[in-house]
């Protein structure tokens, strides 16, 4: 008798379980249908995004090529102040076009565009130099005491002409930089180096082979390049176009510009104001903070540079070596607020 009761109970439990499974089937099917619909929507959105990016890339390629050819034509023709000013204005538009393309262009296309822009900026600087009138220098007639001249030639820091106190410059375009620069400092160790607004105005500045130096650039240069610097502090007024760092380490930089590119640089703090997105490549230990250097006349220099002081993308950085958008790059970071207080002077 007990066996009959147990069998009946088991049968009833089995029926209840079967009914529960039958009720769960529509729910599982419904969830699977929802997941399928979501996946369809994701794929559709991805195709739409790819189509938009391809359309934007095509537009960029046509516009960039057209403007680049226009600038080259202006620079290759007979030089005049008007033609060079038009070329400079078009270059700024070309830079803005490239800055806007950071959102959708591939890293290779960005690199190619920046290299083309750098070459055009260098050509513009050379043409500007050619238009400047030749200065007549008056050499000192008196003979120097041989004891006052270091072995191997003239004193490195003494100007060769009377009344001219120009900073030292590389005699040729240095190494892989491949550019002609108007002014700057080179091969200095543990010195305080300064340039005034009159010396800097719309000129291209190269700082190279510096160690333990403090450099203050009071004014509005056209471009700035810092190469092979170790343990230096570089403070610069607003730069009209681009700032390049290459092969630097342990430095502090304060700069405002349209575009910043940092290459093969390590353990460097950058206090930045930039109207586009900064770019780092082959770097490590780069830390960013807002631009905070100030000096008398900086408002005038910002006005001359054409930079929009209300627009600062100092924390928007693209790392060409880190393409994962959902994971932060390990090569750069934001400088904590408690570490941003610094004695500039």
Image (cartoon, grey):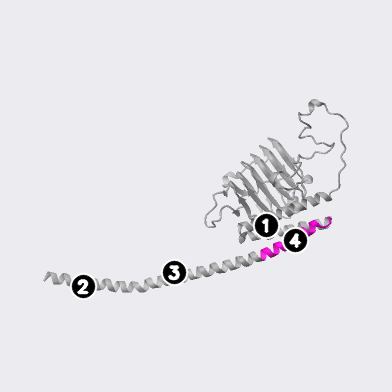
Determine whether the residue tagged by mark 3 lies in a helix, strand or loop: helix
On the image, which quarter does residue 307 sit in? Answer: bottom right
| Residue topped by disc 4 | 69
Return the x and y of residue 51 as percentages of the image width and height.
59, 68
Instruction: Tell me, for residue 11, which label it has, or none.
Output: 2
Check disc 1 and report the residue beneath it: 113
Q: Is residue 11 above or below residue 135?
A: below
- Per the rendering, the mark at residue 35 is 3
Magenta span main SS: helix
Q: Secondary structure at mark 2?
A: helix
Q: CA distance from mark 1 to mark 4?
A: 13 Å
- Say if 267 sits above or below 310 in the image: above
Marks 3 and 4, how far apart at CA: 51 Å
Residue in view at x 88 percent, y 37 percent: 138
Describe residue 267's horizontal placement relative to residue 184 as left or right: left
Label 4 secondary element: helix
The answer to whether marks 2 and 1 mark residues whose Cβ atoms lie closer than 8 Å is: no
Q: Is residue 165 left or right of residue 323?
A: right
Dot 3 crowding, Cα within 10 Å, few <14, some 14–19, many 20+: few
Give the side of residue 220 with respect to residue 340, left or right.
right
- Up-down: is 106 above or below 137? below
**What is the crowding at mark 2: few (fewer than 14 residues within 10 Å), some, or many (at least 20)?**
few
């Amino acid at each position: 008798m007990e066996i009959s009761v147990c069998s009946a109970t088991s049968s009833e439990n089995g029926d209840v379980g079967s009914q529960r499974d039958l009720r769960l089937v529509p729910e599982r099917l419904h969830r699977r249908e929802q997941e399928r619909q979501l996946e369809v929507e994701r794929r559709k959105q991805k195709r739409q995004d790819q189509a938009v990016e391809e359309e934007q890339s095509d537009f960029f390629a046509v516009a960039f090529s057209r403007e680049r050819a226009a600038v080259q034509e202006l620079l290759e023709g007979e030089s005049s102040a008007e033609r060079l000013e038009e070329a400079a204005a078009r270059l700024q538009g070309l830079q803005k076009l490239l800055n806007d393309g950071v959102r959708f262009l591939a890293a290779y296309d960005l690199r190619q565009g920046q290299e083309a822009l750098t070459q055009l900026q260098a050509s513009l600087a050379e043409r500007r130099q050619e238009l400047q009138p030749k200065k007549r220098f008056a050499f000192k007639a008196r003979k120097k005491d041989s004891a006052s001249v270091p072995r191997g030639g003239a004193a490195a820091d003494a100007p060769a002409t009377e009344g001219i106190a120009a900073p030292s410059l590389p005699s040729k375009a240095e190494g892989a930089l491949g550019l002609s620069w108007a002014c700057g400092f080179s091969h200095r160790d543990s010195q305080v180096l300064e340039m005034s607004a009159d010396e800097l105005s719309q000129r291209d500045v190269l700082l190279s082979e510096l160690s333990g130096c403090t450099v203050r650039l009071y004014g509005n240069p056209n471009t700035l390049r810092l190469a092979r610097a170790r343990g230096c502090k570089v403070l610069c007024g607003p730069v009209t176009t681009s700032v390049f760092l290459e092969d630097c380490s342990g430095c502090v930089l304060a700069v405002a510009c349209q575009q910043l590119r940092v290459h093969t640089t390590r353990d460097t703090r950058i206090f930045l104001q930039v109207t586009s997105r900064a770019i780092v490549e082959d770097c490590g230990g780069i830390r960013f903070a807002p631009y905070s250097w100030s000096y008398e006349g900086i408002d005038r220099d910002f006005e001359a540079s054409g930079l929009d002081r209300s627009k600062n993308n100092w924390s928007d950085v693209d790392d060409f070596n880190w393409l994962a958008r959902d994971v932060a790059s390990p090569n750069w970071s934001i400088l904590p607020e408690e570490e941003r207080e610094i004695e500039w002077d």
